[in-house]
Image: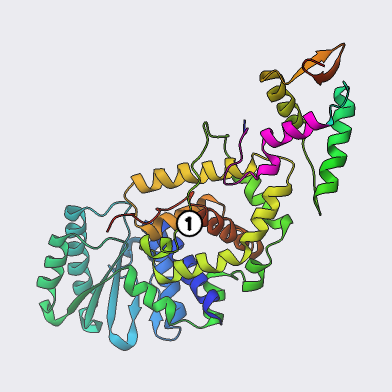
Amino acid sequence: MDRLSRDLYLQTFQIRFMRAEASAFQDLFADLMEARYPTDFQRVTTWGSAGDLKNDGYLRSERKVFQCYGPQVMASKAALEKIEEDFSGAVSSWHAHMDGWVFVHNARRGLPAPVVETLETMSGRDGIAVTAWGYPHLMSLVTELGEDALVALFGHVPARPDIADSRFEALLPVLEALADVLPEGQPPVEPVSPNKLSANELSDHVRRLLEAGTEGMDQVTRVLSVWRDPTLGDRVAHAFHEKYVELRGGGRLPDEIFAELQIYAGWEGALPERQAAILVVLAYLFATCDIFEAPSQHP
Amino acid sequence: MRILPTKHLGPDRALLHLGAEVLGMLTEPKSVSRLWDELKRAQTGQRTGVARLSFDWFVLALDLLFAIQAVDDFDGRIGRSGS
């Protein structure tokens, strides 16, 4: 599997992680663990009135019980209550089989300090090691998967030729679906800084995806130069710029903003050819300074 | 309305350029349909591949020429002002 495919799978996981909450987050975790530890991880489901006995998954070789917590918003008080309740319940039901208890969470920016302190304090209680797994740990599991497992988990991703040779017929529907109203006034024309990629603090795999997308950029320019609606380019740029400003104002991380823009462009559920076209369009908009920040002129 | 070029609209498709191209065709007053036919032929000749111009965009170019009083109506035909 080439570097581009691997980066696309990492990005696919990032999008799934961002969107998954509650039971969907638990399912994503279990899917990932089954792919990574196919003969070792046991998915646990509820069973009538018995429930799941405070166990969302069990890694047999390490005697680890997992508890997933994927709220829409991570609040310290609610998280602490869940930790106490679920750890106590797990110890009660699984103590004979448990050496470790793992709190699996979806807090992209890190856990609240009181939660971290509680987990550290709890560790060693009843002889059980307590740890937390978040986005970095789950992402590392994705990097350990082979191609077959990734395809089974996430489906097929675009190949490099799909991106470099993006066809008119693939690009035009993406552009037309996203075009907004024509903005007022004359948009500024600024030169693109070669440092723009590094200035926006995107992670390495997202940067590589944007670089790959630039291989098809000439096709976007061609589509916009010959399509019968000369305003299409400006209207697409305006739509994405407005969306970018909205996302940036919401305090999202740069990687999250890029993922949200992919979703906005119709990435989820799209066939690889359309995903390739979306990547090329995003690279084009990045290069023309309609999304993300130009590097500061001052040190 | 895009009178001037933008990041995503080349100079050859901005209304200013298109207006100049239409003005150049007005060697005599002409009907809108004749002007449109001539412009379409000229546009296709200048580009390769799919080369189309919408009638709406052509009308906007005429609107611009009227707005700056570069053209006028002569018994239903369009001609250069002062001609």
- Residue B15 located left or right of residue A84: right
Residue A142 location, quadrant: bottom left
Residue A223 vertical position relative to residue A230 in the rendered view, above or below: below
The quadrant the C terminus of chain B occupies is top right
Residue A92 vertical position relative to residue A189 in the rendered view, above or below: below
Q: Residue at x 37, y 58 (%)?
A: A254
Identify which residue, A21 or A281, lies in the foreground: A281
Tell me the amino acid under the disc marked 1: Val
State which chain disc 1 sits on.
A
Return the residue at label 1.
A192
* The residue positioned farthest toward the top in the image shown: B75
| Residue numbers of the magenta segment | B3-24
Identify which residue, A282 or A81, lies in the foreground: A282
| Coordinates of residue A218 in the picture (x, y in percent) | 65, 60
Identify which residue, A188 or A271, lies in the foreground: A188
Quick one: SS at disc 1?
A: loop
Q: Residue at x 80, y 47 (%)?
A: B51
Q: Residue at x 14, y 76 (%)?
A: A123
Display colour scheme: rainbow
Identify which residue, A17 or A251, lies in the foreground: A251
Residue B18 in magenta stretch: yes
Q: Residue at x 63, y 51 (%)?
A: A174
